[in-house]
Image (cartoon, rainbow, N blue to C red):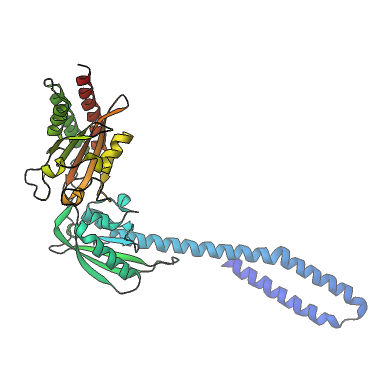
Amino acid sequence: MAQTEEFGEELADFVRRVAELKAARSVPHDDLPTVLDTAIFELDHVADQLWPWYERLTATGATNTASADRQEQQLLKAIFQRLPLPVALIDRETVVRRLNFAGTNFTGVRAGYATGRPLTGFLAHADRAAFRSQTAAVARGDGDRSLTVHLQQRPAVPVRATLTALRPSGEPRTAVIVVLQSAEARSPSAEGGPGPVPDLGETTRHAALMDLLDAMTTALLSGPAATRAAVLERAARVLQGRFADWVVADEGAARLCRTTVLGPADQRDVRAEDLEAQDPAACPLVVEAARGGSTALQVRPEDPDAFGRDASDAPVLVRANVTSLLCVPLTLEGAVQGVLTLFRTGPRLAFSMAEAQTMDLMSRHIALALGNLDRR
């Protein structure tokens, strides 16, 4: 403020001196060179002193304005994150830009994972088209909307989604604010209760994986297996139930042959016979694993046809309500011996990176057991 006032006084003095120079035009002709020299001096003063001074003041003012804007944005971000209701900021294609703390608890999805992914990917397949349509309508200015949807991890619980348009400052396109609330009861986050994803503790999770690894090793070493299909069935029986809801084993690489399918006994939508009748070559995930020899971990698979279709021409992943999957090649000395595919369905916790690493270790043990049969 002091520099601004000083600049104003200097500028006022300059204006007065210019007025005096204008009046000096009436001096005798012989005195005009002196007046001209004075005018040039004043112009130099403007160019060398006043103009740089003005630029510094302008830059300082812009910096202060930018700083104030940043503080305002930080305040708004903090308010957004601390809202007691689950709130998401999405674009017209339903891609998540921000998800607040209550939203992560309510959906069971980490904010870092959700950002950049369509919010429809966390909804039941039957609700996705309607949610996309309503979001597009709100974004183009047709007014606020509200509809009932179902989260893929909790399909039995109806969720009320309220959508309203928002035009962020400095952005050309309209965004959409989504507020999620349980249609049956208060939001778990609003009640201050625990989120849907339990925290069992790193030690407990590690111990469970070590128990699983021990069970797999015991099964593979508990007596000779007559065929490769028998080895795959032993491995599948260890994994089904305690580690995955569905386990599908395919033998070979260039020519895949389905040998084992194990799933929940109470599954009504998909039967084991439906998956046994599938041609593994019609399952893009299995074919890719057999060709590339790399593990695929997917949470809420975006492509419903990634594991092909059943006899009724329905996507298997949709019919089985698959929420996460692991597709693991059984590789021995660089050659793929077969492929194991594991599904988790419904509200079950998704496969983690630690579980995928443990499964990768077990896959090498299974591949060694298959290789031992060939050496006999």
Hey, which quadrant is residue 227 in on the image? top left
Residue 117 seen from this side: yes
Front one among 361 and 225: 225
Residue 185 placed where, x, y %? Answer: 13, 62
Q: Residue furthest right?
A: 30
Residue 55 placed where, x, y %? Answer: 63, 64
Front one among 67 and 304: 304
Image quarter (top left, top right, bottom left or bottom right) of the C terminus: top left
Residue 19 placed where, x, y %? Answer: 75, 80
Front one among 176 and 298: 298
Is 291 placed above or below 312 here?
Answer: above
Task: Indicate left or right for 88 with 44 as reference.
Answer: left
Q: Residue furthest top?
A: 376
Residue 346 seen from this side: no
Front one among 188 and 293: 293
Residue positioned 83% across, 80% down in the render = 24
Is 319 placed above or below 374 here?
Answer: below
How many marks the image carries: the answer is 0
Residue positioned 80% across, 69% down in the render = 40
Hey, which quadrant is residue 333 in on the image? top left
Residue 258 placed where, x, y %? Answer: 18, 36
Residue positioned 79% across, 80% down in the render = 22
